[in-house]
């Protein structure tokens, strides 16, 4: 029997600990639970376990000398594909939920809610007034509105097209970030953590694909090795005949 390549380990990027370290922790070290992060953590853990199972089954199949190497290769590919697909689905489902959560956070913290008594027309007048100011005066006025919690002015700036207030898109988004960090700091911090977790999950997904490919490539290598060994034996027998 041809020797197999060394055992393949599950990549470190495909590990729930990559998500675990993103959680917020209290001063005493206690982890602050977050339902979205927990779901991502569990999905990564489930994917890791499925990959470990795939590697273990692959080793068992390729070590079965009662079957031809070709048959072992086919069986390995089937098992790896099934388990890797299951792992990928878990990762994809968790990512979709987390992405929806991010969208909900962005929507709820995009701009202040309309203040009672305010109207579209009044907000339009505020934007027009800001557009007539020079850049320095307008910048100071918007900064003051954010600092003092003037929700009517801030909403006018953040909810309408940037050019109606005489601002560039970049300037308006910088003001939005400033306002969000002041008024919705917890949500913004959570948004950042979820974003980091999604990035980690994406790296895990890439690692999963590569891992599954490596498992099946190793089976292919074993088949080639067996073919080479068989050829060498045949030539040796011919030489001694």
Image (cartoon, rainbow, N blue to C red):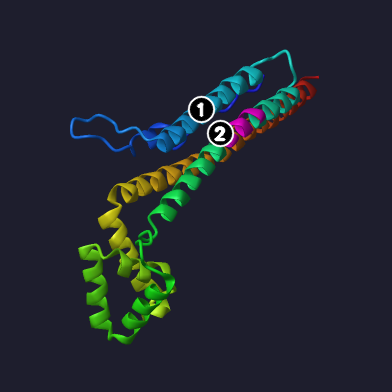
Q: Which quadrant of the structure image shows residue 87?
A: top right
Give whichever of discs 2 and 1 has the lower sequence position.
Answer: 1
Q: What element carries label 2?
A: helix
| Along the viewing direction, whichever of 31 and 50 lies nearer the viewer | 31
Q: Position of residue 17 (x, y in %)?
A: 38, 32
Q: Where is residue 73 in the image (x, y as percent from the top left)?
A: 70, 27
Q: In the visual, does 120 lie left or right of 81?
A: left
**Residue stretch in magenta:** 82-89
Q: In the visual, does 179 lie left or right of 223?
A: left
Whether residues under marks 2 and 1 lie with C-beta atoms below 8 angstroms apart, the answer is yes
> Circle 1: is it few (<14), some (14-19), or many (20+) Cα within 10 Å?
many
> Circle 2: is it few (<14), some (14-19), or many (20+) Cα within 10 Å?
some
Whether 136 is drawn above or below 151: the answer is below
Residue depicted at 41% across the width and 79% down the height: 164
Q: Where is residue 185 in the image (x, y as percent from the top left)?
A: 28, 51
Majority secondary structure in the magenta region:
helix
Return the residue at label 2. Answer: 90
Q: Which residue lies furthest to the top in this view?
A: 66
| Along the viewing direction, whichever of 150 and 94 lies nearer the viewer | 150
Residue depicted at 26% across the width and 35% down the height: 25
| Along the viewing direction, whichever of 138 and 73 lies nearer the viewer | 138
Regarding residue 206, the answer to whether it shows in the image is no
Q: Which quadrant of the structure image shows residue 127?
A: bottom left
Q: Position of residue 21 (x, y in %)?
A: 33, 36
Residue depicted at 33% across the width and 37% down the height: 23
Q: Is residue 140 magenta?
A: no
User: Where, quadrant-wise, is the N terminus in this rendering?
Assistant: top right
Return the residue at label 1. Answer: 46
Find residue 217 and name its label.
Answer: none
Calculate the distance from the C-alpha at mark 2 to the C-alpha at mark 1.
8 Å
């Amino acid at each position: 029997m041809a020797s197999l390549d060394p055992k393949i380990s599950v990549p470190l990027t495909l590990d729930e600990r990559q998500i675990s370290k993103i959680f917020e922790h209290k001063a005493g070290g206690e982890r602050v639970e977050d339902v979205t992060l927990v779901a991502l953590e569990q999905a990564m853990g489930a994917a890791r376990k499925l990959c470990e199972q795939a590697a273990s089954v692959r080793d068992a199949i390729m070590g079965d000398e009662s079957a031809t190497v070709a048959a072992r290769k086919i069986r390995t590919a089937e098992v790896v594909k099934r388990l890797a697909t299951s792992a990928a689905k878990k990762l994809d489902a968790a990512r979709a939920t987390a992405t929806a959560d991010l969208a909900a956070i962005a929507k709820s913290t995009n701009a202040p809610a309309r203040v009672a008594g305010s109207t579209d027309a009044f907000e339009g007048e505020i934007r027009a007034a800001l557009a007539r100011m020079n850049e320095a005066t307008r910048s100071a006025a918007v900064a003051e509105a954010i600092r003092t919690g003037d929700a009517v002015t801030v909403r006018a700036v953040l909810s309408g097209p940037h050019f109606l207030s005489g601002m560039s898109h970049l300037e308006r988004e910088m003001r939005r970030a400033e306002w969000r960090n002041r008024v919705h700091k917890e949500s913004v911090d959570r948004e950042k953590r979820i974003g980091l977790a999604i990035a980690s999950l994406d790296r895990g997904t890439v690692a999963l694909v590569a891992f599954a490919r490596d498992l099946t490539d190793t089976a292919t290598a074993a088949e080639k090795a067996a073919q080479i060994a068989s050829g060498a034996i045949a030539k040796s027998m011919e030489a001694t005949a």
